[in-house]
């Protein structure tokens, strides 16, 4: 294998990680919709993060051992988790409670723009025309994937879109910070420590909320329907997806990686079809545009 083919293979591998990560992240949206039937956004995201933390910590201990866990820069990782995953996770779910899963997935098209701004401001990255063209194509693809829909509550959609923008900026900052500020850790360790940080932060808020009667919890979450949704939401929607995404970001950067998020509306609709919904050919055309956008964004 020559020296030129190796980087190309690494880029392809990274983009496969990213595409898979966004697909698993998309699985969390329909699962969250089920959980939001009985819980408010804060308990949903907190229970999800706690369960994901337990799973990731066990895997980390098995794969890398106790010394790796004890020697991790926990304070730095927890602070990144609080702002990167805690805030973004809550805002995404709050936006979904106000709108619907597909609307949130489409609104997340703002993520590449925020990621590019961060790389230009903090990493002195020069944005090329091919990258800008790729982002535009991917955003158009995300819009095409769901079509133009009329909604009855414009105010809820506006607030939901604003919250998604906040969540996208927070998530873009968090993924960049976990790669840049925790270089000594593996992707699994970065994922685990930051998820635990977010879980501790939101868990503390939830405990105070329940104690002061601002929040409520229900044992109904342990019934089969809701427990399966919780496992899917925690295991695939954050544990697996975040590990895959962090792997990809470390290879191609947060700006290029975030372009993949525009495929989320197509993935969500694909999952809805698998669960019994109707197939929409327009969604496939949107996915093709997204694929072209990802290709252009990666083009050197």
Image (cartoon, rainbow, N blue to C red):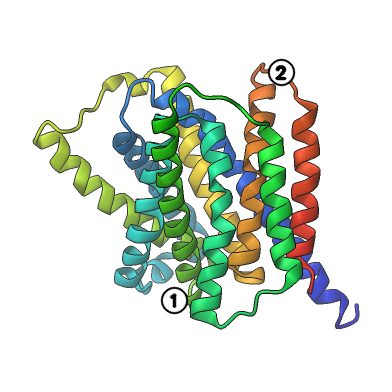
Circle 2 SS class: loop
Q: Quadrant of residue 282?
A: top right
Tell which circle, 1 or 2, labels the residue nearer the N-terminal end. 1
Q: Residue at x 46, y 18 (%)?
A: 225
Q: Residue at x 38, y 72 (%)?
A: 72
Specify the quadrant that holds the C terminus: bottom right
Q: Is residue 244 above or below residue 129?
A: above
Using the image as rendered, state which of residue 176 and residue 162 is in the foreground: 162
In the rendering, which numbered label is found on residue 288? Answer: none
Q: Position of residue 152 (x, y in %)?
A: 47, 21
Query: In the image, 96: left or right of 285?
Result: left
Q: Is residue 173 above or below residue 287?
A: below
Q: Is residue 91 above or below residue 30?
A: below
Structural crowding at the residue carrying mark 1, measured as other residues with C-alpha within 10 Å and reported as few (<14), some (14–19) or many (≥20)? some
Using the image as rendered, state which of residue 9 and residue 287 is in the foreground: 287
Structural crowding at the residue carrying mark 2, measured as other residues with C-alpha within 10 Å and reported as few (<14), some (14–19) or many (≥20)? few
Q: Position of residue 128 (x, y in %)?
A: 71, 74
In the rendering, which numbered label is found on residue 278? Answer: 2
In the rendering, which numbered label is found on residue 181? Answer: 1
Query: In the image, 196: left or right of 259?
Result: left
Q: Residue at x 49, y 61 (%)?
A: 172
Specify the quadrant that holds the N terminus: bottom right
Query: In the image, 180: left or right of 15?
Result: left
Q: Is residue 236 visible?
A: no
Q: Please name which of the two marks, 1 or 2, marks the residue nearer to the observer.
A: 2
């Amino acid at each position: 294998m020559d020296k030129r083919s190796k980087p190309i293979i690494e880029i392809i591998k990274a983009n496969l990680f990213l595409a898979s990560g966004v697909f698993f992240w998309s699985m969390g949206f329909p699962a969250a919709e089920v959980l939001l039937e009985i819980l408010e956004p804060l308990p949903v995201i907190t229970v999800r993060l706690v369960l994901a933390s337990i799973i990731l910590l066990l895997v980390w201990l098995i794969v890398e051992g106790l010394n790796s866990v004890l020697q991790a820069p926990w304070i730095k990782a927890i602070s990144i988790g609080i702002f990167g995953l805690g805030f973004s996770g809550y805002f995404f779910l709050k936006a979904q409670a106000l709108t619907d899963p597909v609307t949130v997935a489409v609104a997340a098209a703002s993520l590449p723009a925020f990621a590019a701004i961060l790389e230009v401001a903090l990493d002195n990255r020069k944005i090329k025309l091919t990258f800008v063209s790729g982002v535009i194509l991917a955003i158009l693809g995300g819009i095409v994937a769901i079509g133009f829909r009329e909604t009855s509550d414009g105010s809820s959609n506006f607030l939901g879109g604003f919250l998604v923008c906040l969540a996208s900026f927070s998530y873009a900052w968090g993924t960049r910070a976990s790669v840049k500020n925790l270089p000594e850790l593996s992707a699994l360790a970065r994922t685990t420590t930051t998820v635990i940080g977010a879980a501790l932060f939101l868990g503390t808020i939830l405990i105070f909320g329940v104690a002061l009667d601002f929040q409520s919890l229900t044992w109904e979450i342990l019934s089969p329907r809701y427990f399966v949704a919780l496992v899917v939401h925690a295991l695939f929607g954050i544990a697996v997806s975040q590990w895959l995404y962090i792997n990809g970001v470390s290879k191609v950067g947060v700006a290029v990686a975030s372009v993949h998020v525009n495929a989320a509306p197509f993935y969500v609709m694909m999952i809805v079809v698998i669960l019994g919904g109707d197939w929409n050919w327009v969604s496939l055309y949107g996915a093709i545009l997204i694929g072209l956008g990802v290709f252009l964004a990666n083009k050197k």
